[in-house]
């Protein structure tokens, strides 16, 4: 089985996350796509929702999306969520099965700033996902890594346990958790940016500064 990891803070989970996971299933129909919330991301601010609330929101989504699974291992560690540590653990569990770690082009371009970044390809494949206008790094150590390990067809990653890098362009919903939180804080409704069940949860628990009165545009 092909294992695909989609990580993030999911603070909150939104339609952009879910569409990305679905795009992976469209390309790798037999894959298991894991949504993996990070506990203490080294490069990002502390999440606005609690760990338990982020898990609750993901579980609500998974009730209607049985092809996705929730992996909470990064929430069960006290140290920062270094990807290489997570991939080491997963590799021990899945043996030689193909493992694909998803990254956006922005994150991939800064890969050489990650903890033990050169070890990532010893543990998994990397699939860089970008918009048609996205550009991969053209020079420097990350560009050299890409040229040395790239595959011409991203679906070929399913035939390799680790060590390969693919790139695929796909339409992406221009949605971010940051924008959703800003909308809520400003008193505007984020409806149609995230599943209704998640918006209901945010309202019920007063997350991200949500006030009990009806937001503008709700």
Image (cartoon, rainbow, N blue to C red):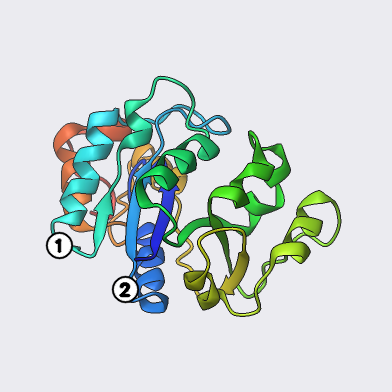
| Residue at horizontal 63 percent and vertical 33 percent from the top | 115
Residue 65, image x and y in percent?
A: 20, 63
Viewport quadrant of the N terminus: bottom left
Label total for image: 2
| Residue at horizontal 34 percent and vertical 42 percent from the top | 184
- Res 29 label: none
Q: Secondary structure at mark 2?
A: loop
Viewport quadrant of the C terminus: bottom left
Residue 99, image x and y in percent?
A: 46, 58
Nearer mark to the viewer, of 1 and 2: 2
Q: Residue furthest right?
A: 139
Which of marks 2 and 1 precedes in the sequence?
2
Task: Determine whether, in the image, residue 64 is placed left or right of residue 152.
Answer: left
* Residue bearing mark 2: 30
Residue 80, image x and y in percent?
A: 49, 26
Based on the displayed image, in which of its 4 quarters is residue 147 positioned?
A: bottom right
CA separation in Å, label 1 and label 2: 18 Å
């Amino acid at each position: 089985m092909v294992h695909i990891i989609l990580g993030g803070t999911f603070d909150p989970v939104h339609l952009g996350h879910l569409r990305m996971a679905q795009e992976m299933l469209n390309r790798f129909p037999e894959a298991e796509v894991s949504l993996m919330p990070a506990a203490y991301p080294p490069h990002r601010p502390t999440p606005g929702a609690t760990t338990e609330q982020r898990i609750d929101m993901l579980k609500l989504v998974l009730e209607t999306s049985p092809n996705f699974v929730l992996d909470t291992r990064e929430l069960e560690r006290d140290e920062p969520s270094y990807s290489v540590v997570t991939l080491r653990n997963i590799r021990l569990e899945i043996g030689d099965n193909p493992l694909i770690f998803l990254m956006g082009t922005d994150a991939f371009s800064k890969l050489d700033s990650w903890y033990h970044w050169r070890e990532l390809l010893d543990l998994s494949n990397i699939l860089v996902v970008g918009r048609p206008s996205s550009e991969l790094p053209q020079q420097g150590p990350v560009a050299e890594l890409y040229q040395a390990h790239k595959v011409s067809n991203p679906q070929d990653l399913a035939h390799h346990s680790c060590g390969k890098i693919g790139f695929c362009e796909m339409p992406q919903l221009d949605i971010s958790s940051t924008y959703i939180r800003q909308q809520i804080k400003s008193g505007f409704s984020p409806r149609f940016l995230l599943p209704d069940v998640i918006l209901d949860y945010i309202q019920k628990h007063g997350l991200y500064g949500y006030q009990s009165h009806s937001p503008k545009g709700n």
